[in-house]
Amino acid sequence: MELRKQGMIHMLMKFCMDEKKYYSVLVKYDQQLERDVEIYRVKLSGPLKLGEGKLENQNPAIIFTRGDAVQTIDMNKDNYFEEALKMWNLLEEYKYHYGIRKPTILGVREHIFTGFVSSLAWFMSTQETSFATFGQRVLENPLKIRLHYGHPDRFDRFWFWTRGGLSKASRVINISEDIFVGFNCTLRGGNVTHRDYIQVGKGRDFGLNQVSMFAEKVASGNGEQVLSRDVYSWVIGWIFSGCCHSSIPQWDSFSTQ
């Protein structure tokens, strides 16, 4: 019995020693040393990628942000120098009330720069411009039902930091991860706006296989949204307004495709 007990303790100690530790690390490039230098390190409770990949990047990174606003931007997006000069004007929008509240999500238009690659790329560029600019403009005013659709929106950092963060990262149910931020914002009394005087560049799919996979992903995400408690709260609590929030943007997206 004593030998068995000692063996179990040895196995437990070995397991603890071999256990991996995960950290969220902030680094910056040092020009003098010509290498990345670690600034902060925060230990995580478990593996980094427990849910969807994009969300698991955003949630550990937000702890290193500072200031009143934070922008989420994907790898297929770019910016222009002349648009960066307008950032001061855009941030001033947070000082004004639109309706009864200040904006908590501030959306901007997009410029698709991959439309010249092929005829299919031109089609996708036209479709994306129709939804990401014209469609969202109408969703914000006069309908006032715009949400967040993964575009380079600006968020009120403190507002979202105290309400669950920017993203929900559960596997399967949060396939369309970005729209749940809009769900969370609206259900908790936030305000979503859209501005057209500033834009962000975006590269769109120009391969038929890529386009079909993206359409499959969006369709799967819409199906999972119906099963979520967010949509249930909308339909039960707000009736007509909730149905408009959840259905009209989806119809707009698919009709443009």
Image (tube, helix red, strand yellow):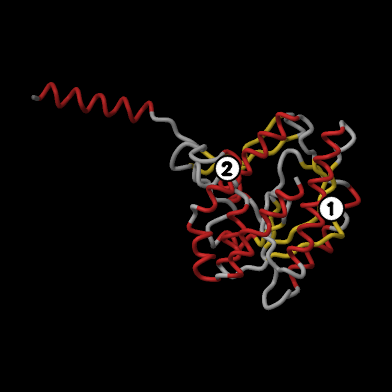
What element does badge 2 sit on?
A: helix
Q: Residue at the far left: name it.
A: 1
State the residue position of label 2. 220
Q: In this view of the protein, which residue sits in the foreground, 99 or 140?
A: 140
User: SS of the residue at dot 1?
Assistant: strand
**Residue sitting nearer the eye, 173 or 250:** 250
Q: Is residue 187 above or below residue 49?
A: below
Estimate the x, y position of residue 159 in percent, counting from the top left. Answer: 60, 64
Q: Give percent across and percent down for residue 9.
A: 22, 28
Mark 2 → mark 1, Cα distance in angstroms: 29 Å
Q: Residue at x 73, y 63 (%)?
A: 139
Out of 140 and 61, give the one closest to the viewer. 140
Which of the labelled discs sits on residue 68, or is there none? none
Q: Nearer the viewer, mark 2 or mark 1?
A: 2
Q: Are marks 2 and 1 in contact (CB under 8 Å)?
A: no
State the image quarter where residue 97 is shown.
Answer: bottom right
Kind of residue indicated by mark 2: Ser
Q: Which mark sits nearer the N-terminus, 2 or 1?
A: 1
Q: Residue 100 at x, y = what percent?
A: 68, 78
Give residue 117's position: percent from left, percent from top: 87, 31
Please name the amino acid that badge 1 sits on: Gln
Residue located beneath label 1 in the image: 199
Toward the front, the furthest residue is 255
Crowd tier of the residue under label 2, counting other residues whose Cα lies within 10 Å: few below 14, some 14–19, many 20 or above: some
User: From this viewpoint, which residue is outermost toward the bottom?
Assistant: 100
> How many numbered dots are placed on residues in this image?
2
Q: Residue at x 53, y 53 (%)?
A: 226
Between 200 and 132, the residue placed more toward the observer is 132
Locate the N terminus and report the quarter of the image it occupies. top left
